[in-house]
Amino acid sequence: METCAIMSGIELPLTALRMQVASAIDCVVHTMRLPDGSRKIVELAEVLSLEHGEYRTRTLFRWRTESLSPDGSVTGRFVLGEKPSFAADAGIMGLELPEYP
């Protein structure tokens, strides 16, 4: 079994450490510099529980570049990915989510 020493000097199994990280992070926001020099959020992913000791994510939104204009500017749109696991909780809190396919 692989272990990892944390700052307190305590050895933890790697899987236990990964479980703590996965439970502490709700979403990952991926940004990128586009060809026109602008920065854009290109993906929003929900962090799920571990599967066989490996991290899993679910893409909620993804940027799709549709064209590059002659002046180099980028146009595109966000497309929906999968429905988030927290969709029911969001509805209870009054947050409106888009309709997922």
Image (spheres, rainbow, N blue to C red):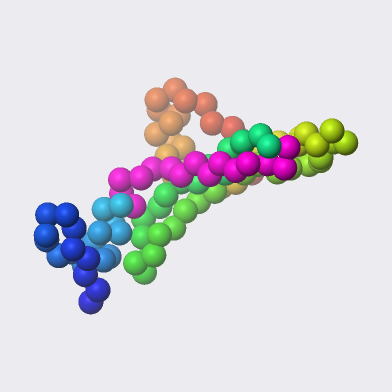
Residue 28 located within the stretch drawn in magenta: yes
Taking the image as shown, residue 50 lies to the left or right of residue 94, namely left
Residue at 50% of width from left, 41% of height from top? Answer: 29
The residue lying furthest to the top in this view is 94
Image coordinates of residue 74 in percent, x first then y, are 76, 36
Q: Is residue 25 above or below residue 75?
A: below
The residue nearer to you, when weighing 46 against 30, is 30
Quadrant of the rendering where the C terminus is positioned: top right
Q: Is residue 10 above or below residue 93?
A: below
Q: Is residue 83 visible?
A: no
Using the rendered view, name the quadrant where residue 18 is placed.
bottom left
Residue at 53% of width from left, 44% of height from top? Answer: 30
Image coordinates of residue 9 in percent, x first then y, are 11, 60
Taking the image as shown, residue 79 lies to the left or right of residue 54, namely right
Quadrant of the rendering where the N terminus is positioned: bottom left
Image coordinates of residue 59 in percent, x first then y, are 54, 48
Residue at 45% of width from left, 29% of height from top? Answer: 91
Q: Is residue 47 above or below residue 54?
A: above
Taking the image as shown, residue 100 lies to the left or right of residue 67, namely left
Image coordinates of residue 52 in percent, x first then y, are 36, 69
The residue lying furthest to the right in this view is 70
Residue 60 located within the stretch drawn in magenta: no
Using the rendered view, name the quadrant where residue 60 is placed.
top right
The residue nearer to you, when weighing 96 against 79, is 79
Q: Is residue 67 visible?
A: yes
Region in magenta? 22-36
The residue nearer to you, when weighing 87 against 28, is 28
The residue lying furthest to the bottom in this view is 1
Residue at 11% of width from left, 61% of height from top? Answer: 10
